[in-house]
Amino acid sequence: MATKDTKDPEKGVRDDGGEAHSLNFASSGFDPSETRRGSIYQVIPAGQRRMSLQGRRISVVDDIFGEIKEDGPNYRNVGWLGTAILMVKTQIGLGVLSIPQVLDTLGMGPGLVVVISIGVITTWSNYVIGVFKKNHPSVYGIDDVGYKLFGRAGREFFYVVFVLFWIFVAGAGMLGISISLNAISTHGTCTAVFVVVAAIIGFVLGSIQTLHEVSWLAWVGATSILTAIFTLTVAVGVQDKPAAAPPGPFKSNWKGVNDPSFEAAISACSSIVFAWAGTPAFFQIASEMRVPEDYTKSLLLCQSIVATTYIVIGVVVYYYCGSFVASPALGSAGVLLKKVCYGLALPGLCVSTLLFVHIAAKYVFVRMLRGSYHLTDPTFRHWATWLGCTFATTIVSYIIASAIPVFGSLVSLIGALLGTLMCFQPMGAMWLYDNWRSKRTVKWYAMVAWSSFVIVSGFFLMIGGTYGSVIDIKNSLAANGGSSPWTCADNSNST
């Protein structure tokens, strides 16, 4: 692992003699608070953006996006609150729907320990992203991190893993939409048709160009999902019994501690990794922030909301449903409330899918056009490349959703095989890269031990979780009446 530099050189503006200076608005009399809302005249931190004056036109020259002009898309316009909501939406959406099932597999006590432990690790990983980007402003995504850590091979490896991760997650989103449409319509048509509808939604909405334009949809999506899952929480508390319970009197059979097989336990842990696995998107979200210094504030708000939601929803739903909890959890309510919950969740599932398509496509798009004026100019090549990226991402995600039509198994496979590589190992290595030459103190040794633990636990979950998930998928496809690729069967258990 290369450790030649631990902090990129600062950039800013250059004077006529070529000497670099950071931007100092205070000394120039420029007041960022008086800028026009939504324009490119924003606070420009040294080392990330600088101003370019060409005639009467003022533009921003960004380390990542190049020259951002007034007549082109402004990729640096997401506020701290919008950032927090985008972070929330990359996590709450699909993962929360599998948490009650995880508690059923592991038991209430061990399940909560896993949820909180993985939450702590990923919160630290998310924080490391903010620090690393501050030290290395030109880093746009995890492939840039891979280049700094392991050279060209690292860049290509993490680039492929990142794109595959979000394509798989987008496929899970499409599968979630198809389940929702089946539940609302009581299996109104072939499930394969609903997956196609989900893919069309993902392509059309995912083609919105900037996260600033998407951020208001993230508000809608987050509100939708939260309303649906809290409605579910109330519903399971007041209903006589869960939808899957047999006829007759019912008493919840929840367990404090369960005794699952290794395959089932590690697969459940992988589902929790998936629930917290918004981490890789935080690179891009931070790159489009108006004021990157607000990153940590946005992160703390996000993780507080996510942790509270996961714990409350998981505990209450599992407590009242016991082993009859469904996956996705929205199917745990009675027949009518199941339709209501999925109806409330549908906009949120659509927003989740568009975000996942957008993130994967944007990554490829920036990689293809980075360093070219086509990246920020609305040229034909700009639009053809962007729409080509979103279309290709959508098609591959559609194939995954159709080929692995088992929601819980797909979620755990993504969390194990790709989620750990995006949330655990790289962040441990990032801390070591930036701090390896720091003064050897007790705190330094403790952080080295912690970073090493994060890396090792990531590999353990990746190998064991992938094995457990593959076994689960194999059993589901082999079962009598089980799921099959491109199936027309009802995947919401409504019929």
Image: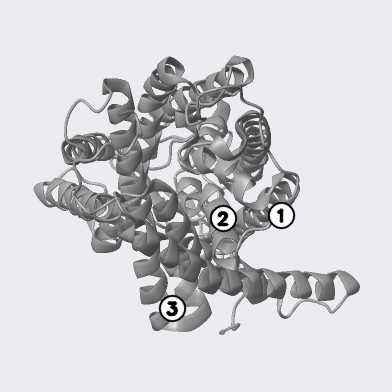
Mark earlier in primary sequence (2, 1): 1
Residue at the location (37% across, 20% down)? Answer: 343
Residue 364 picture quarter: bottom left
Residue 224 in sight here: yes
Judged by depth in the image, the label closer to the viewer, 2 or 3, is: 2
User: Foreground: 74 or 206?
Assistant: 206
Quadrant assignment for the N terminus: bottom right
Residue 443 picture quarter: bottom right
Tell me where residue 326 appears, x and y as whole percent.
Answer: 49, 37
State left or right for residue 160 relative to residue 427: left
Q: CA distance from mark 1 to mark 3?
A: 28 Å
Q: Secondary structure at mark 2?
A: helix
Label 2 Cα neighbours within 10 Å, binned few <14 / some 14-19 / many ≥20: many
Question: Residue at label 2?
Answer: 268
Residue 354 picture quarter: top left
- Amino acid carrying label 2: it is Ala
Q: CA distance from mark 2 to mark 3?
A: 29 Å
Label 1 Cα neighbours within 10 Å, binned few <14 / some 14-19 / many ≥20: few
Question: Residue at label 3?
Answer: 154
Question: Residue at label 1?
Answer: 117
Mark earlier in primary sequence (1, 3): 1
Q: Secondary structure at mark 3?
A: helix
State left or right for residue 187 relative to residue 453: left
In this view, 96 is above or below 164: above
- Amino acid carrying label 1: it is Ser
Tell me where residue 97 appears, x and y as whole percent.
Answer: 50, 38
Q: Hey, which residue is sitting farthest right in the picture?
A: 442
- Amino acid carrying label 3: it is Gly
Q: Secondary structure at mark 1?
A: helix
